[in-house]
Amino acid sequence: MGVTIYDLAREAGVGIGTVSRCLNNHPSVSPETRAKVLSVVKRLSYQPHAYAQRLASRQANTISAIIPFFTNHFFVEVLRGVQGKSQELEVDLILYGVHNADQVEYYLKRSLSRGHVDGVMFFSMKFPDSYVEKFQQIGLPVVLVDTHHPLFDSITVRNVDGAKSAVDHLYDLGHRQIAMINGYSGTRPAKERFEGYRRSLESHGIAVNPEFLFYSGKEKLDGFSRESGYNLMKRVLEKRNDSSSPSALFVASDIQSLGAVDAIREAGLRIPEDLALVSFDDIELARHAGLTTMRQPMYEMGSLAVSWLKARMKDPDLSPREETFLPELIIRRSCGSTARVTQSPASGRGAMV
């Protein structure tokens, strides 16, 4: 193997992030550090972006999207944005649906195959550390969506703030016993949405009750599924006989909320009279189910990812960018709020008024 950015970092006594910023002419690097790194680059005869230079004369005009099991409603919405922008920019799209962890590296390896694709979009999973160097070394453009790495472009949602707003809304409606149904605890969205839940409760002087926390298993990588929502809601309902039973729920995804609603109705309970509910995502089914939820701009995230990837394909030396979106509270009937909900004539989506 040739000289890598790890070799440059070791020789120059700096981090790989600093090396990358020097190679990309990022303004945050001091002149002294830049001179030291570039001296090592020259001494070791390092040639960055060799792969990108080869592709410049014979691009495949094809991009790939590596995404978890894209039958999930969240990813369906994101992929609508990806597909729409891909058609507009006249690039071909290859979809890789990941059903288990082993497939992540397999699809990354396929994307690295010479001339296979001109860029990669990577969704909602941790980008493997072992592939960071490989992509940096050959200069194959990467855009991360719903996940983050400092060396790549990333598009994320402020999950913590969104979850806090959801629980704050339930508190403002008078609820003090608020349970949470979450996805698999090892995923970034689950961790961040729990953090928002925790911050909201503690800001109101309420300690987190471990008996009010319900996590799904690792099925389908992240546990955000209708089945997990249904099963976890069954466990919540087991506490209905307790004097401290929850009066409200924050559910970390709309698809889980749909399962939870099924379980609540099977138990003969009413929403929101017996249990108020606020969710997260605002997939299309949320409007039909009357879910109060935190809206993520899913279509916009997918569209922006393609735009950024196309820009990086033209100019690999662009500095890494990061865009974060703040979710919007959309009030519908599931929370019991007296706020009125109307339909937006342009989009048909629920809007708070």
Image (spheres, rainbow, N blue to C red):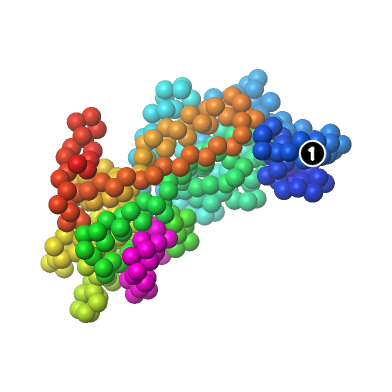
Residue at 59% across, 24% down: 314
332 in relation to 227, above or below: above
The one nearer the camera, 22 or 222, is 22
Q: Position of residue 349 (x, y in %)?
A: 23, 38
Left or right of residue 336: residue 35: right
Q: Position of residue 49 (x, y in %)?
A: 70, 32
The residue range painted magenta reads 193-218
- Tell me the quarter of the image containing the C terminus: top left
Queried whether the magenta region covers residue 129, the answer comes back as: no
Q: As drawn, is 119 to the left or to the right of 47?
A: left
Label 1 SS:
helix
Residue at the image position 72 percent from the left and 30 percent from the top: 50
User: Which residue corresponds to the image point at 48% horizontal and 61% vertical from the top-left?
Assistant: 186
Q: Is residue 217 magenta?
A: yes
Disc 1 target residue = 32
Q: Please name the amino acid that badge 1 sits on.
A: Glu
Nearer the observer, 266 or 292: 292
Q: Is residue 256 left or right of residue 75?
A: left
> For residue 39, what is the image quadrant?
top right
Q: Position of residue 80 (x, y in %)?
A: 36, 35
